[in-house]
């Protein structure tokens, strides 16, 4: 059941989660500098069993916050998961077309978009064949070390939030629209994805201050790939509070804007319907 819903934590658990079956479960983390989403997924039955959202304490470091979550959560501290996935939410990323991608240049790609510190950061990549692009990304070395220390005998997979979002959108692209724009509003930023003739045209992430600032960013993005301008269909995902706050202004500027749907093929108990369909799209797309 939903244990709590405040500005700090959302916790929803399927009572069928069985600690004796953890060896067939995947534990996933989506980690930013202000919050962390956690899921438990039954790989064998393809079912979501746990969803949590926790805001991090600003006065603590990322590692201190993760230690708090780990110490407070008996289930997360278990050491015999089937696998563990970690998705980082940051601006240390770059999309590169597959034909020209060189894995040895990951750090260089990332540093074209965001300043990083090779002494403190790790660099990795993920090739998205369906999208025709590779995502190069960086993340804190201490984050990797923390997970390796806590789960020394398990398979760890690190990815960027853009990977989960782009993979989820591939099944929901508007086939009849010459161009379309997809947004997801998180606590820390907005992810923006544009498609032209069902092909990826642009992906970016922005920090924004209010709905008017967000509107300007959307208009600047549309200018780069869509001839339809403010008539371009827009599909909006995101945290309910962020969506509710910004939707009224966005409707004034854009003719065709609608709420996004939950990723397809996600098996979950009706208790998870307490989450709005457009919430945590990239987290659920990873299941």
Image (spheres, rainbow, N blue to C red):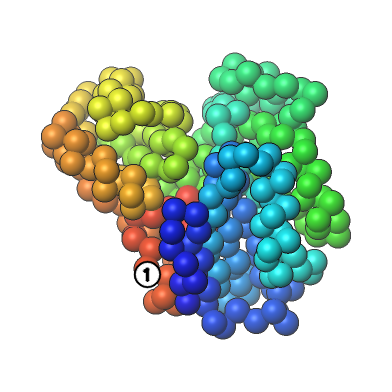
The residue that mark 1 highlights is 273
Where 116 falls versus 69 (above or below)?
above
Where 162 falls versus 79 (above or below)?
above
Measured as percent of width and height from the top left, residue 201 is found at 39, 29
Measured as percent of width and height from the top left, residue 26 is found at 66, 64
Q: In the figure, is residue 245 to the left or right of 39?
A: left
**Residue visible at 47% across and 37% down?**
188
Q: In the figure, is residue 106 to the left or right of 161?
A: right
Where 103 falls versus 15 (above or below)?
above
Q: Please name whichever residue, 245 or 68, is drawn nearer the observer in this view of the structure.
A: 68
Mark 1 burial class by Cα count in 10 Å: few <14, some 14-19, many 20+? few
Measured as percent of width and height from the top left, residue 219 is found at 26, 24
Res 196 visible: no
Q: In the figure, is residue 175 to the left or right of 200?
A: left
Where 1 falls versus 255 (above or below)?
below
Q: Please name whichever residue, 87 or 134, is drawn nearer the observer in this view of the structure.
A: 87
**Residue visible at 77% across and 38% down?**
142
- Element on which disc 1 rests: helix
**Residue visible at 61% across and 72% down?**
42
Measured as percent of width and height from the top left, residue 85 is found at 67, 54
Res 228 visible: yes
């Amino acid at each position: 059941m939903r244990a709590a819903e405040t500005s700090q934590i959302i916790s929803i658990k399927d009572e069928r989660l069985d600690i004796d079956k953890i060896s067939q479960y995947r534990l996933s983390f989506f980690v930013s500098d202000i919050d962390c989403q956690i899921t438990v997924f039954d790989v064998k039955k393809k079912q979501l069993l746990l969803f949590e959202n926790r805001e991090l304490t600003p006065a603590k470091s990322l590692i201190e916050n993760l230690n708090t979550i780990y110490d407070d959560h008996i289930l997360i501290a278990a050491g015999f998961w089937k696998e563990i996935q970690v998705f980082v939410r940051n601006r240390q990323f770059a999309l590169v077309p597959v034909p020209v991608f060189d894995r040895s240049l990951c750090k260089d790609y990332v540093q074209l978009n965001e300043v990083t510190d090779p002494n403190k950061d790790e660099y990795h990549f993920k090739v998205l064949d369906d999208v025709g692009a590779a995502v190069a990304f960086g993340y804190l070395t201490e984050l990797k070390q923390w997970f390796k220390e806590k789960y020394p005998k398990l398979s760890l997979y690190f990815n960027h939030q853009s990977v989960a979002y782009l993979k989820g959108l591939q099944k929901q692209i508007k086939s009849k629209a010459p161009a379309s724009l997809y947004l997801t509003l998180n606590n820390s930023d907005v992810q923006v994805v544009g498609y032209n003739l069902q092909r990826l045209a642009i992906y970016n992430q922005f920090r924004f201050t209010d709905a008017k600032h967000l509107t300007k960013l959307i208009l600047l993005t549309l200018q780069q790939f869509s001839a339809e301008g403010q008539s371009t269909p827009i599909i909006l995902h995101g945290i309910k509070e962020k969506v509710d706050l910004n939707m009224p202004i966005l409707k004034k500027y854009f003719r065709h804007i609608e709420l996004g749907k939950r990723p397809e093929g996600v098996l979950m108990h009706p208790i998870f319907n307490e989450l709005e369909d457009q919430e945590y799209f990239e987290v659920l797309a990873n299941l």
